[in-house]
Amino acid sequence: MRRSIMVFGCTMEDGSQVTCEDEGVVSVRVHPDHSVTVTNSDNDESEVGGKWVGYVPRFN
């Protein structure tokens, strides 16, 4: 079974990066279909446009 995982950050197919250090981003989650969602401090989740091609795992 494949599932989404929480990561420190990811690289998108256009070369941009999405990380936990971006303003307003508390967590980044990558999904098996290569979509990315981010959560803000109000616990609102939103999907990032594009697909991820690589990620940096969290080590905690």
Image: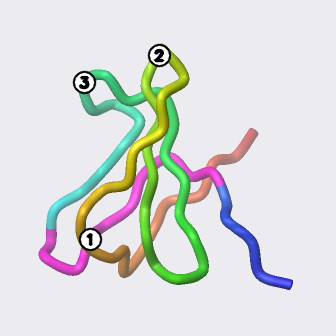
Name the residue at the right extreme: 1
Report the residue marked by disc 3.
Answer: 23
- Number of numbered discs overlaid on the protein picture: 3
Mark closer to the chain start, 2 or 3? 3
Q: Residue 23: x and y, percent?
A: 24, 24
Q: Nearer the viewer, residue 56 or 29?
A: 29
Mark 2 element type = loop
**Amino acid beneath label 1:** Met
For discs 2 and 3, the disc positioned in front in the rendered view? 2
The answer to whether residue 28 is left or right of residue 22 is right
Label ID, residue 41: 2
Asked if residue 50 is positioned above or below residue 20 in the image, the reply reads below
Residues marked 2 and 3 touching at CB (< 8 Å): no
The image quadrant that residue 48 belongs to is bottom left
The residue drawn where x is 30% and y is 67% is 11
Instruction: Compare residues 13 and 31 and report the one nearer the observer.
Output: 31
Figure quadrant of the C terminus: top right
Measured as percent of width and height from the top left, residue 12 is found at: 26, 71
- Mark 1 burial class by Cα count in 10 Å: few <14, some 14-19, many 20+: many
